[in-house]
Amino acid sequence: IKRLAVLTSGGDAPGMNACIRAIQLTASACNIEVIGFHHGFNGLLEQEYQSLHSHHVDNIIQRGGTILKSARCPALEQTDGPARAAEALQQLNIDALIVIGGDGSFRGTLAISKHYSGQLIGVPGTIDNDVDGTDNTIGFATALDTALDAIDKIRDTADAFERIFLVELMGRHSGYLSLAAGIAAGAEQIICPEFGTLSPANLKPIITPIQHAQLLKGKASYIMIVAENSYPGGTTALAEALTEAIGIECRACILGHIQRGGSPVGADRILATKLGAYAVEQLLQGANLMMAGEVNGEAVLYPLAKTGDRTKAIDPFLVRWQQQIGSL
Ligand code: F6P
């Protein structure tokens, strides 16, 4: 490998910069030239890129976002998108491309592989932690702490006003972040898409625990973590429906993109460094169409094609504990 490219794609995640840094430093140490495409796959299609030298990655390990910018890329989903992306890689003499992103970005990478003779490798970077084949994705640990900080604050005002709060967390179609944050915040209820879509016609399963907690335990505050996409009309609509159904004021708080920002926590910086460096090392050993992940503390390769087979399962032990004990 003489020339290596890297891009960040999809929802940005804290630690992406740390990963870019590790890739640049590791590749440079092996005398490989590194370039970075801007704005995800769009930069590849438009040939919008920069050389990455060590001074570009100085002082970025602690910064959220991504110095390469990120974006989703509808153009890659057009019929000729993947072939055009592969052509751009060949024209620029790129021997290997590292894609830092989530499952959608890996799907794009796989599509490009049908037209490209170089090596392609993925590094999981998303706050959702929904990628199969790695225990954690870059950004998840930071998003969890960010969400916790916010939920703890909401708890104070919920307690003062004796209110029920529904806090909506990100995760797209995964409840991983919601389950983790809900457990760590001591939330009274956690609602995830994995439990099936809630029906406005049948809110009983979530109302009963609220009434139980209020009548039997006299709880002053009640926090319900709601993963996005768990209720057809959204979390604000769910709060309204609950208010109507139980006659107690329920407030919704949508945390939104705050969960994607901030300086990465130590665990994310370490994971990002490890996976970025490992990706480069494995490319040099010939790896292709793999994701660099971490399982039980060890860096591992996992077939990119398998990452899309299913969304990573949420912890059944914590689900059972929350439902049987934490929600009572
Ligand atoms: O995948 C990361 C993520 O933040 C999801 O949790 C969320 O559903 C989505 O991206 C939001 O995307 P956008 O910033 O494009 O609205």
Image: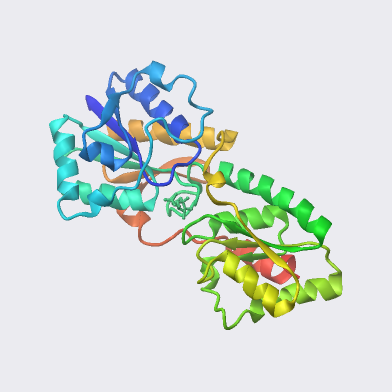
Q: Is residue 228 visible?
A: yes
177 vs 276: above or below: below
13 vs 159: above or below: above
Q: In which quadrant of the rendered view does residue 55 lie?
A: top left
Please tell me which residue is depicted at 20% across the width and 31% down the height of the picture. 94
Please tell me which residue is depicted at 29% across the width and 34% down the height of the picture. 283
Q: Residue furthest bottom?
A: 201
Q: Is residue 115 visible?
A: no
Q: Could you tell me residue 212's position as x and y percent?
A: 78, 76
Q: Could you tell me residue 176's position as x and y percent?
A: 54, 57
Tally the numbered discs: 0
Q: In which quadrant of the rendered view does residue 280 lie?
A: top left
Please tell me which residue is depicted at 60% across the width and 63% down the height of the picture. 226
Residue toward you, 215 or 106: 215
Q: Could you tell me residue 140's position as x and y percent?
A: 53, 46
Which quadrant is home to the C terminus?
bottom right
Which quadrant is home to the N terminus?
top left
Question: What colour scheme governs how the chains and residues are painted in the rendered image of this protein?
Answer: rainbow
Residue toward you, 205 or 133: 205
96 vs 191: above or below: above
Q: Could you tell me residue 270's position as x and y percent?
A: 52, 33
Query: With 282 as the anchor, is 172 left or right in this view?
Result: right
Please tell me which residue is depicted at 55% across the width and 35% down the height of the picture. 264
Q: In which quadrant of the rendered view does residue 24 lie?
A: top left
